[in-house]
Amino acid sequence: MNPLHLSGWGVKVAVEDMKSRSHLKITNGRLDDKQSTVARYPPRRFPYSSIIVDGYSGYFSLRAIHWLSRNGTSVYVLDVDGSLLSSILPATPLKADLRVSQMDASRDLKKKFTIAHAIVKAKVARSFQVLEWLEERYDLQRQIRLAKSEAVNLRRVSTVGQLRTAEGRVALRYWDAIRKILPEHLEFRGRMTSSHNNNASDPVNSALNYGYALLEGECRRAINVVGLESSIGFLHDFSDYQTKQSLVYDVMEPYRWLVDITVLQAFESRMLDLDTFHFKFDDYRFRFNPEAKERFIELLKERFNSGVRYRGQQMKWDTVIEQKTNELGRFLAGKRFALDFMEPSPTLMRFDSRVLRSRILSLNASEAKRVGIPKQSLHDLRLKARRPQPFKLHTETMRKLRTVQ
């Protein structure tokens, strides 16, 4: 995952020297305190996986769209609230037999439930991994216990409707736990209002929306590559009254944790806070300050590009999403007899757990000297342990701390 982010006034993407070199010319937008910049790229040497546009004005030429499509580059246009407004994807493979199988499966209640259950099972498992990761730093025993009591109902459901209801109740407990650990001044109350998903009315939801938009783009790309129909889902029904990419939302569910944990890390470290957003009175929404948005995108890239072992290979998470979407296609076509979104499972580690902080603060100078921690290093460790912000330690320091009784 390596998107090029374009924002501000006057975004322009066009092709120049069409008769000879056909370079893609990209003009980034102008912001209040930042002038526009221009970059040029030759064909087949474009270093970005996609382009994300949330600028206020500008244009893409038809030749540029052709150039990007031939180079396998997707374009995603984001709305002011961070949601995905539109996308331009390379040509979809023509696989009529696969789409017929997908439509048949969506009408087969048993097969539809099997697919939806596999999706929810993985999403809930990842949600508990995030909560357990948080519990190493915060007291969330009660919230985790309540979430697990709701998750028991997933074993008793027999229809997709019942499955959605049970998953929704687990999600409410999940967001209750996250609300507990976030500072009160952020005014995060959860992902749901009385009528619909929260629309960036607080900084945390604004960041979540933006991260989910990037995840949605990755899932749209994977569905497009495999040749599935994005509007025919299994957990999310397709709708006759609005544009709804049901399969995109299905594929997103097991990987929403990628965004959740990135947002939590950003607010924990104070990389994002109230002062890194601005409030718009015309629509009552929070929006990123430009510099904070760039830092957040870099953090998302780092998380998506973190490696995981799957089927004997080291993969990045965007590759995993494409691989699992391909496995779904093979299952629909009858070329796989089982469907599993549980693997690969991430390893979520904390270096600043309550246990470790307590161990550092209780460590005296003689014990530190015995295990090879210098006096100045002990002082620095104590400062880190007292601060609320997360921190990381070198592997050798961790090894030394583990030897302390």
Image (spheres, rainbow, N blue to C red):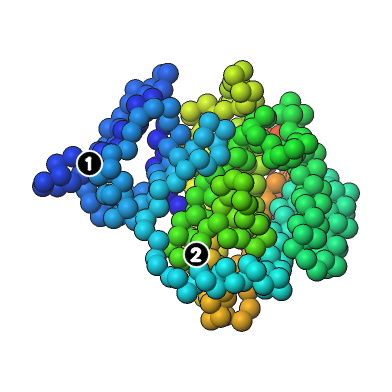
Give the image quarter of residue 127.
Answer: bottom right
Which residue is under mark 2? 228
Residue 73 in the image: x percent, y percent?
A: 36, 52
Q: Nearer the viewer, mark 1 or mark 2?
A: 2
Mark 2 residue crowding within 10 angstroms, few (<14) / some (14–19) / many (20+): many
375 or 234, nearer to the observer: 234
Contact (Cβ within 8 Å) of mark 1 with mark 2: no
Q: Residue at x 27, y 32 (%)?
A: 38
Lower sequence index among marks 1 and 2: 1
Q: Which residue is drawn at 81% across and 48% down?
A: 173
Residue 269 in the image: x percent, y percent?
A: 63, 37
Q: Which residue is drawn at 59% across and 45% down?
A: 242
Give the image quarter of residue 117.
Answer: bottom right
Name the residue at the left extreme.
20
Query: The C terminus is located in which quarter?
Result: bottom right
Which residue is under mark 1? 15
Question: Which disc number belongs to residue 86?
Answer: none
Relative vertical location of residue 262 with respect to residue 164 in this rendering, above or below:
above
Residue 355 visible in the shown view: no
Residue 337 visible in the shown view: yes
Residue 131 in the image: x percent, y percent?
A: 75, 51
Q: Which amino acid does label 2 sit on?
A: Leu
Q: Along the horizontal axis of the image, is 364 left or right of 380?
A: right
Q: Residue at x 41, y 22 (%)?
A: 31
Name the residue at the front extreme.
240
274 or 78, nearer to the observer: 78
Q: Along the horizontal axis of the image, is 1 left or right of 351?
A: left
Give the image quarter of residue 385.
Answer: top right
Relative vertical location of residue 90 with respect to residue 93 in this rendering, above or below:
above
Q: What residue type is labelled 1?
A: Val
Q: What element carries label 1?
A: strand
268 or 330, nearer to the observer: 330
